[in-house]
Image: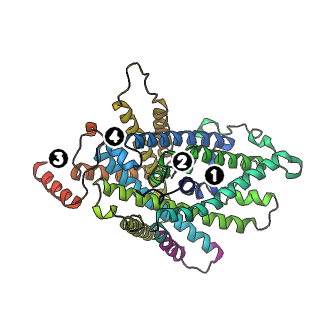
Amino acid sequence: MQNGGSGLKRRHVEFLTIGGTIGGGLFLGVGQGIHAAGPAMIFAFLVAGAAVSVVARCLTKMALAAGGRVTFVRTTRLNLGRRAAFVGGWSYWACAILTCMTELAGAGTLIRAWFPSIPSSWIVGLPALLSLTLLNRLQVRRFGEIEFWMALLKIATCLMVIALGLLAMVRPATSGAAIGNLWSDAGVLPHGWHGLLLALPVAVFAFGGSELVGLAAADADEPARAAKGLLSRITAIYVGVTVALLVVMPWRDVPVADSPFVVFLRHFGLPGAAPIMAVVLLSAVLSSGNSCLYGATRVLASLADEGLAPVRLGRRNRRGAPASAVTMSSCFVLIAAMLGLLAPARLFALLLAASAMTGLINWGIFIVAHLCLIRRMVRPVGAGPVLSWPSWGVLLLIALTIGVMAGDPGMRPALLDVAALFGVLTTVAFVLIAPDDVAAGLGPGPASSGWLKRAIRRACHTARVGPF
């Protein structure tokens, strides 16, 4: 936590969340979703945006119930217990590490496209990782200021695309655009409801990283106002960009292998469209990787604060940054990158799908924790029940999205990877983590000193007396 005046400003929180949310998934992946659902991709973004807003609202309410500036590891422990917080926190950390590695590999691939003589993308990725590590060790406000300008380029590009789309609708005769593209080719649902279901994973993944609003708010000067209305603005950007793309070109012409944004800018005859988008994409992946590393380090430090990780990982340097957590997270990004170089491309894609599923399950953990909080809340006599149907609706959407992915033979192995990850974490949690009384109230977490020694003693005790 930062002292007053040294934390993130509201604009820092907003752009840090945008930096973690709007990344290569929008600039490259939106074409895949449009081909799966056609114009119905607009509705997929609206559904995903509404779901993420519910998740963010649940995190906010739990944070306020716990006293304000707390992370979701703390709120999960308070509402579901230390074991659930252990599983959720470490799985989120692993997901953030893999995502950061992917973004850095993407940055290296973009540079190699400009300089084909570079033998490996990680010759570029390693200096980028070192730079992001140093950035995350800065004072949180300086870090937020740098991320602000990195994310600003992405937002400006999206707003430019939306503005050009509006111009095309106003002057369709000169631009060749047609608003009828939204329904003229086989209707709004060209592939039926099945196509919309196939687009849901793409839409949900596009909002991955939006939970950073909860992590960044814990570092903010004004946590209660840190991200008010932020997710609705991100949803508006996604919907606006998708509408602009579809108005300018029919959904069947939207490219999948190339960035739709490059084709869009070429349609308006803008010179140097490909180099412009290359710079934007490079900024996008670096900003997203920077935000992911921030999320990983803050979760790791929060785990240490709650006694669920070695105490050293929770220590802050003189700038207020969790330096040990930054170093450990960066080292694991490097290890994951080395393993990624050894793995075939198909396996690498499966690991990406597994990280996305892990993020969905973590959203489910947040929702369940909030439902438990609602159940324990003491309401005045005569007060009506607290509406929880939006939370149950999001749980249904998460289950539906994972079911759609599991039905894809190419993604089914990723589901087994996720099951194995959560199986290992759950086993470790039940062996090493002592249970606590969730209903005991919102008191402070257990002291984290001697975490490893206590864990070893508990493991030895379990081996002697059997499982509890």
Q: Which residue type carries mark 1?
A: Val
Asked if residue 406 is positioned above or below residue 333 in the image, the reply reads: above
Q: Earlier in the sequence, mark 2 or mark 4?
A: 4
Give residue 216's position: percent from left, percent from top: 48, 54
Give residue 42's position: percent from left, percent from top: 65, 42
Give SS at disc 2: loop
Which residue is more in the foreground, 48 or 29? 48
Q: Which of marks 4 and 3 is in front?
A: 4
In the displayed structure image, the side of residue 149 where residue 213 appears, left or right: left
User: Which residue: 37% across, 35% down?
Assistant: 373
Residue topped by disc 4: 79
The magenta-colored residue range is 113-132
Q: How far apart are marks 3 and 1 (CA)?
A: 48 Å
Q: Which residue type carries mark 4?
A: Asn
Main SS of the magenta part reads helix
Instruction: Assess whether residue 125 is covered by the magenta stretch.
Output: yes
